[in-house]
Amino acid sequence: MTDSKQPIAKDSVVSFHYTLTDTEGNTVETSRDSEPTVYLHGANNILPAMEKAFEGKLAGDTFNITLTPADAYGEKQADALQRVPAKYLSHEGKLKPGQVVRLHLKDGGMQPVTVIKVGKFSVDVDANHPLAGMTLNFAIEVVDVRAASDEEKQHGHAHGPGGHHH
């Protein structure tokens, strides 16, 4: 149940809309044309600097956050360019330069990578996060704040629309 007077604190489930722009004011992405983004506050579900900016806000609050690369996804690393066998990439259709795909990792995880060059059997990829090296400007609208359920706290993430689904 929503408590519109509840400030965002540890174990709050927060629903919010955002518009992310670059330093020139170009929209990089937005949640405005879909469901709000949902996260469990204090569970490291979003960037730490963003989470700190949410602390104490209430449903209905709007605010802006500017994150430097150091507070967001880091600087671009030149040594993050790799040549990998195409079979380790998860994608739909034909690979194209500039496309973001998922690289299967040895530990079973997946990492987003950007295709640089496509060869017959291998692909050159940039393993930097697609937003690495960018200063990010977020316009935030807090839509809802509620207490997390015991299950959400135990699992370390929000459940339901906009959150994690089992």
Image (cartoon, rainbow, N blue to C red):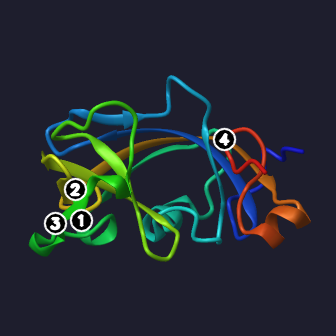
How far apart in space, not on screen, are marks 2 and 4 (Cα)? 25 Å
Instruction: Classify mark 2: helix, strand or loop.
Output: loop
N-terminal-most mark, 3 or 4: 3
N-terminal-most mark, 2 or 1: 1
Q: Which residue is found at the position 56% from the left and 26% from the top?
A: 34
Three-letter residue code for mark 2: Thr
Q: Which mark is residue 69?
A: 1
How far apart in space, not on screen, are marks 1 and 3 (Cα)? 9 Å
Q: Furthest residue to the front?
A: 121
Q: Which mark is residue 76?
A: 3
The residue that label 4 is drawn on is 162
Q: Which mark is residue 135?
A: 2
Mark 1 or mark 3: which is in front?
A: 3
Mark 3 or mark 2: which is in front?
A: 3
Quick check: marks 1 and 3 in contact, CB under 8 Å? no
At label 4, counting other C-alpha atoms closer than 10 Å, the crowd grade (few under 14, some 14-19, many 20 or more) is some
Three-letter residue code for mark 3: Lys
